[in-house]
Amino acid sequence: MRAAIVGCGGIAQVHAKVLNNLENIILVACADTKYERALVLANLYGAMAYGSLEEMLEKEQIDVLHICTPHYLHTPMAVKAAESGIHVFMEKPLAINREQLAQISALEEQVRIGVCFQNRYNPNVKYVKDLLDSGRTGRIIGARAFVTWCRNKDYYKNSGWRGKFSTEGGGALINQSIHTLDLVTEFLGSPSFVESHAANHHLKDHIEVEDTLEAYIDFHNCSAVFYATTAYSGNAPVLIELCCEHVTIRMEDMEISCQWKDGRKEHIYFEQPTTLGKDYWGSGHSAIIHDFYECVETGRHFSVGIPETYTTMDLVFKIYESSRENRVVYF
């Protein structure tokens, strides 16, 4: 299969490395409005470089397009690819507003669309999911999740698109902590209502989006408290804790601790596979991209498509709605 990448920034380097290690996949082209950036990436893998997606689609035969561009371009570029019958594997988020979410959801019947929620493929996440599915834990009673990272003014200033609602869609929630929120929905299911508050504490003169957000999320039979900030002094390990009938499970980085109600304690540590980018991106990119291509080739269902990630995106938008309107939002 012939693959191409649009948007040749940091995360595109990860996609390119993974593609280079897959059998029967050829990276044929890279596109970026900063042509020099596309050229650098293309030269590393013997691909062609283009200054726009339109030119690349016109001149290349492509089976799968990897979308690694700023958030606001994800949906429009997916539409262009689908119109040409090209499958799409895209970075999060699916969309930056409900209009885009509806638009991209309509593409599902035309082509395969995969969403890069790579943390679902992390070994610690799979272990917890299997433990929950086994029934040994009993039902989940409650959960908490914390993301405390650091993003300074240069992170926003140097990008040209981050920090603005019109191009990023939000801040600490839709960009940094969306992966953690996605895992919360993976473990707890579909929400019933949410109440949240957002603030900008440390970059008031530099960005218009939130640097901190907290939410109370009800999941019918249990609830979760969620906290995310980019105003911390560093990038601390993400913490997710699940309080179940028979055990409390705590996930922090690659370590899992289980405190069973009968007094037993378990500590499981998973060796961190080599990450292809920043540590907090995790190690799941290789696994999820490999799975997507296998599904495209064999026709097998891909488990991180639009239907499987819609709950997370819907929750993101309802959290923002709640914080804007200062009210409880129901599903």
Image (cartoon, rainbow, N blue to C red):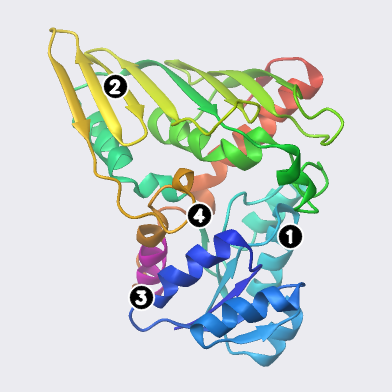
Q: Are marks 4 and 2 in contact (CB under 8 Å)?
A: no
Kind of residue at badge 3: Leu
Which residue is label 3 attached to?
Answer: 22
Magenta stretch bounds:
289-297
Please tell me in which quadrant of the rendered image residue 257 appears: top left
Query: Reading the chain from its start, which is encountered first: label 4 or label 2?
Result: 4
Task: Label 1: state its secondary structure.
Answer: helix
Magenta span: predominant SS is helix
Would you call the spot at circle 3 few (<14 residues within 10 Å), some (14-19), or many (20 or more)?
few
Query: Reading the chain from its start, which is encountered first: label 3 or label 2?
Result: 3
* Gap between marks 4 and 2 measured at Cα: 25 Å
Which residue is label 2 attached to?
Answer: 249
Kind of residue at badge 4: Cys
- Image-based side of 301 in relation to 150, left or right: left
Q: Which residue sits at x=87%, y=31%? A: 205
Above or below, comparing residue 101 to residue 146 in the picture: below
- Where in the figure is residue 267, as x and y percent of width and height? 19, 25
Kind of residue at badge 1: Leu
Task: Label 2: state its secondary structure.
Answer: strand
Kind of residue at badge 2: Ile
Which residue is label 1 attached to?
Answer: 73
Q: Which residue sits at x=75%, y=21%? A: 201
Query: Reading the chain from its start, which is encountered first: label 3 or label 1?
Result: 3
- Image-based side of 240 in relation to 40, left or right: left
Would you call the spot at circle 1 few (<14 residues within 10 Å), some (14-19), or many (20 or more)?
some
